[in-house]
Image (cartoon, rainbow, N blue to C red):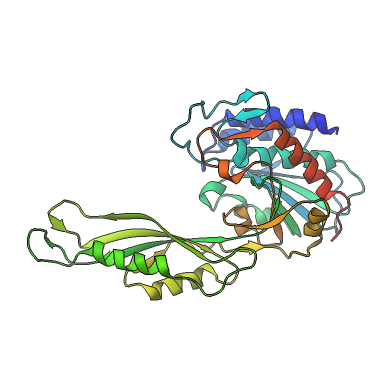
Amino acid sequence: MITDELVSESVEILKAIIEIPSLSREENDVADYLEKKFTSWGLHPKRNGNNLWMSNANWSEGKPVILLNSHIDTVRPARGWTYEPFKATVEEERITGLGSNDAGASVVSLLGAFRHYYEAGCLPYNLIFCASAEEEVSGENGVASVLDHLGKIDLAIVGEPTQMQIAIAEKGLVVLDCEAKGRAGHAARNEGENAIYKAIKDIQILEKYRFPLESAVLGPVKITVTQIEAGQQHNVVPDLCHFVVDVRTNEFYSNEEAFRIISGLIQSEVRPRSFRLNSSGISADHPLVLRGIEMGLQIYGSPTTSDQAVIPYPSIKLGPGDSARSHTANEYILISEIKEGIVTYIKLLEGLKF
């Protein structure tokens, strides 16, 4: 298909899915829309929950398989929107709307590349396109729930806003719920043990601590205290103080190991929410990465976590848009970025052998 046609259709699809609310775990309507659209084109989508996937027409057993994946769910609108989040507002080159940048533009750009190669008869690999759910909440009913249905995968391109530069690694994420325990007492008298003061000491320890091993690509492990809660009334010394720690791990520390280290540093009780989102990446000399470098694309390590974390085979993160726009009011994408995305994906896959 001609790229201009793909760009025009991709823009129309993006506008349509912006206007169908698809908050995480509530993607049913947008999945219905895409399923009908794919079917109307003569494609043959399969579905599990709110995840859709389809294979190229000339599938050949024994060839390597490349997965093209991005997500259809969005976060809730942030405060401060001056546009209607669930309306695609087009102003010259700019499309404003919730999910336009993260990750609707990646969905339609990867879809455009898939359609370009859909009937190609001489590909040295097979392609699977997958539009998945629940990425924004790292949900168990997202792409991880359909991997067994997809069969053997050799390589994945995960669409996220990276300004069309290649993230060859991304940090893992483990969220820790911490609880400092004291003893209640009357605030007017010298009674009790203040759990807030205990929590503050632990937080200061975490603020100063540095994990010894730093990554050349991902940098150091990052520890950030993001929430704190304690006390029920002004005149009672609090006996409990709960705080939340966001930990971004590099490839030298599994999430479980980071939890054990942090637990040994502080007096508060530490409980992990999940260990499943570990650091992930691909070799810098993988043929796909080398192909990108040959095209002039930059490689880097991403501080944010995506569905890459639950895909258990080599993968890169690459997509149109800017991560700095994600989850912000008046999120937008440029039509030129969508075109760049489609063209870059097509060229990246062109003649790829591995």
Residue 162 location (% of width, % of height):
66, 48
Residue 26 location (% of width, % of height):
52, 39
| Residue at the left extreme of this rendering | 189
**Looking at the image, which is closer to me, 338 or 313?**
338
Q: Is residue 105 above or below residue 166?
A: above
Res. 309 in view: yes
Res. 118 in view: no
Q: Is residue 131 above or below residue 203?
A: above
Q: Quick one: quadrant of the N terminus? A: top right
Question: Which residue is at a point 7% across and 58% down the rendered structure image?
Answer: 188
Question: Which residue is at a point 55% across and 36% down the rendered structure image?
Answer: 22
Residue 271 location (% of width, % of height):
39, 65
Q: In this view, does 294 lie above or below 94?
A: below
Q: In this view, does 104 lie above or below 199?
A: above
Residue 2 falls in image quadrant = top right
Residue 56 location (% of width, % of height):
81, 45
